[in-house]
Amino acid sequence: MTAMFPADPPTILNTTDNRDFPVARVFCVGRNYAAHAREMGKDPERDPPFYFTKWSETVRNSAPSDALEIAYPPATENFHHEAELVVAIGMPGFCIAQTDALNHVCGYAVGLDMTRRDLQLEAREKGRPWDTGKNVADSCPTGRLQLVEGGAHVSTGQIQLSVNGETRQDADVSDLIWSVPEIIADLSRYYALRRGDLIYTGTPAGVGPVSPGDEISCTIAGLPDLKVRIGARAGNS
Ligand code: MN
């Protein structure tokens, strides 16, 4: 059999030991920090976590260059930053027990869940899917993947995001409403998790718009930094 056309190569995340992590799928957790849920006009009581997905190709790898640039996407006037802890799945599993969940995690990274907020809020208001707001080309710039060595999992540590040097988001990963083991246990009830899956665990308060030319710096204590420059509007000169 002959392929009708060549398949696209997988999206790769570089690891801190200079290996390639082929990205399988991207899962994102909605409203997982109480202060962010409130700023989005929602009650942060512990409702069950909820998820949305993005194509793996939305992930952009920051390594080896520090000068990762993403285009300002089309069809939005309100493109928002969301700084997030990213969890990488290294072992497949279905209906994973919370107590076993971290055995399925092979690494952590700093990532962004960039969002066409105007489209997301319009969809939310109308009870429609969030795809056009969230599943946006190049919307998941992600830093290098730090592999778990000797059981060094990330459950605490300052998470910060600045735009042009001004701090916009500043919280601690320990403020997550649903912890990483809880997310993995719950998400794996709906989907058999695969090696290569990435989970963006939600963003703290302080989300806001960016403009072409802006420089985003995103850090989580103990993980490689992520720096992103917002380029020109896609399709415009
Ligand atoms: Mn998010």
Image (cartoon, helix red, strand yellow):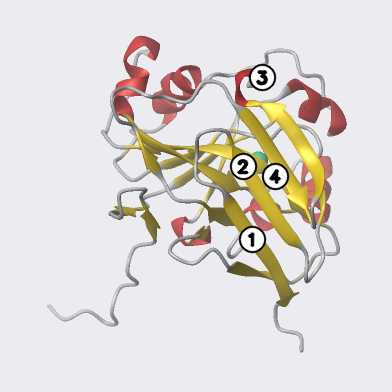
Whether residue 41 can be seen here: no
Please indicate whether residue 156 sits to the left or right of residue 115 in the image. Answer: left
Classify mark 3: helix, strand or loop: helix
Name the element at disc 4.
Answer: loop
- In the rendered structure, which disc, 1 or 3, sits on the residue that comes first in sequence? 3
Distance of label 4 from label 1 (alpha carbons): 12 Å
Is the residue at mark 1 in contact range of ligand 1, meaning its CB lies under 8 Å from it?
no
**Residue 14 in picture, x, y percent from top left:** 37, 55
Where does label 1 land, which residue?
228
Q: Is mark 4 within 8 Å of ligand 1?
A: yes
Left or right: 49, with 124 as reference point:
left
- Front disc: 1 or 3: 1
Q: Along the polypeptide, which appears first: circle 2 or circle 3?
A: 3
Residue at the spot of label 3: 175
Instruction: Provide the residue designation for mark 4.
Output: 82
Asked whether 172 or 199 is in front, the reply is 172
**Residue situated in front as seen by the camera: 79 or 226:** 226
- Dot 4 or dot 1, earlier in sequence: 4
Q: Quadrant of residue 76?
A: bottom right
Q: Which label's residue is closer to the chain start, 4 or 2? A: 4
Whether residue 62 is visible here, answered yes or no, is yes
**Residue drawn at (82%, 65%) of the image:** 211
